[in-house]
Amino acid sequence: MKVVSFLPAATKMIYDMGLQEYLYGVTFECPKEAEHTPKVVRCILEGKHYSSIEIDRIFSASKAQGKSLYWVDDELLESIAPDIVFTQDVCEVCNIDTVCTETAVMKLSKQPQLVPLSPNNLQDVFECALTIARAMGKEEVALHYLASLQKKTDGILDTLRANKAPLKRIMLMEWIAPIYNCGHWIPFQIAAAGGVDMLSNPAGDSIVTPWDKIVRYNPEVLVIAPCGFDVGRTREEISVLTAKPGWDELAAVKNNQVYLADFDMFTQPSIGTLVAGIEALSCMFHPEIFKADEVVAKKFVKFDNLVHH
C-alpha cells in the first residue's frame, strides 16, 4: 500500500501512529519527521520570507484571480502511483485544497482513493485520525493512539475541577496583520484548557477582527500564534501589535499574560499537536496549577512587554 499526504496534519498523524512505512509522498511543509520523503506538493511562497501583511496580500490577490498558491509535481505523483491520497478542504491558504488535488489525480494512469479530511471542531480532528487509520486498514492503531490522548485531556479537566479553577477570558490570534480571531477547533482547545474566547468562531472560519473590538473585550490572557509561524518568527513582527493604541491598557499586558506560541499546536489539525496545544494553554491560563513538560515548554514563551518597549 502506497499513501500520499497532501496536508501536514495527516502526515503528522501517520507518523504519530507509526504508519509511516506506507507514506511515499508529502507536501513541502510537512513535519520534520517527513523531511526525507519526496515532496509532491509545492507552493509559490516556499523558501521566501514575507511579512504577515505581504503574505495576506499575496493570498488575497491569488484568490481574486482564481489562482492557487500550490502546485503538484505531476511526474513524481505518477511515478509513486499511490493507492490513497489524503487531502483537505478547510483552508486554501494553509494547504492545497481538494479541487486542486482532484485535478492532479485525474491525470494519473492509476486512480487512487481520495480521502478528504475536513475537520471543523476538536472531535472532528479525533475522527480524522480514525479515518486515516481506517483507510489504511489499521483502525486499532488509531483507537490505541486516541485513548492515550483522551487520557491527557481528561486529566486536565479533572485538575481544573479539583482546583475550582476560574474560567479565564482569552483571545487567541491566528494572524496579526490583519488580526484574525481563532476558529474551527481552537475555541474547543481553549475551553478544554479552562478558558473562553468570546471573540472566536467555534467550528467556523477565523475572520478579520477590528482592534477596537479587542480593546473593548480586554482579554485577561492573550495568545499570539499566527498560522505557519513559530515563536521566533512571531517575535520578529510583534511590534505590529505593541504599537497599537491601547496595547498597554489591555489586562493581559498589564498582568504580563501575553504569550507567543508555535502555530502547529493550533492551526495544524493533527490531534497529537492539538492536545499539546491544550496542555500549553492550560499552563498559560493557570500557571499556578499546571507546569509544562519538557517538550511542550519549548513551544511557547511569555512575552515580556517591558523588555520589548
Image (cartoon, rainbow, N blue to C red):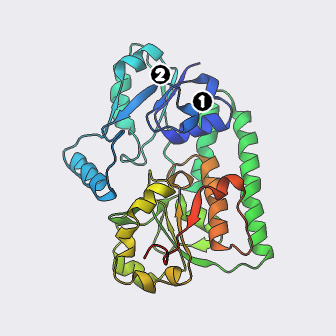
Q: Tell which of 309 and 284 is nearer to you.
A: 309
Secondary structure state at the residue bearing disc 1: helix
Q: Residue flagged by tag 1: what amino acid is it?
A: Ala
- Residue positioned 50% across, 37% down in the render: 30
Q: Residue flagged by tag 2: what amino acid is it?
A: Pro
**Sequence-earlier tag: 2 or 1:** 2
Labels 2 & 1 near each other (Cβ < 8 A): no
Q: Quadrant of the N terminus?
A: top right
Q: Which residue is mark 2?
A: 112
Question: Residue 3: x and y, percent?
Answer: 54, 24
Q: Residues within 10 Å of mark 1 (few under 14, many from 20)?
A: some
Looking at this rendering, what residue extends furthest in the left direction? 65
Question: Can residue 273 be seen by looking at this rendering?
Answer: yes
Marks 2/1: CA–CA distance: 12 Å
Q: Is residue 52 left or right of residue 223?
A: left
Please identify the quarter of the rendering in which residue 235 is found.
Answer: bottom left
Q: Tell which of 309 and 116 is nearer to you.
A: 309
Q: Is residue 46 left or right of residue 38?
A: left
Position of residue 274 relative to residue 17, above or below, is: below
Question: Can residue 193 be seen by looking at this rendering?
Answer: no
Q: Is residue 271 left or right of residue 254?
A: right
Position of residue 227 relative to residue 10, above or below, is: below
Q: Which residue is mark 1?
A: 135
Position of residue 31 relative to residue 53, above or below, is: above
Q: Is residue 202 left or right of residue 75?
A: right
- Residue positioned 52% across, 84% down in the render: 254
Please identify the quarter of the rendering in which residue 248 is found.
Answer: bottom left
Q: Tell which of 184 and 178 is nearer to you.
A: 178
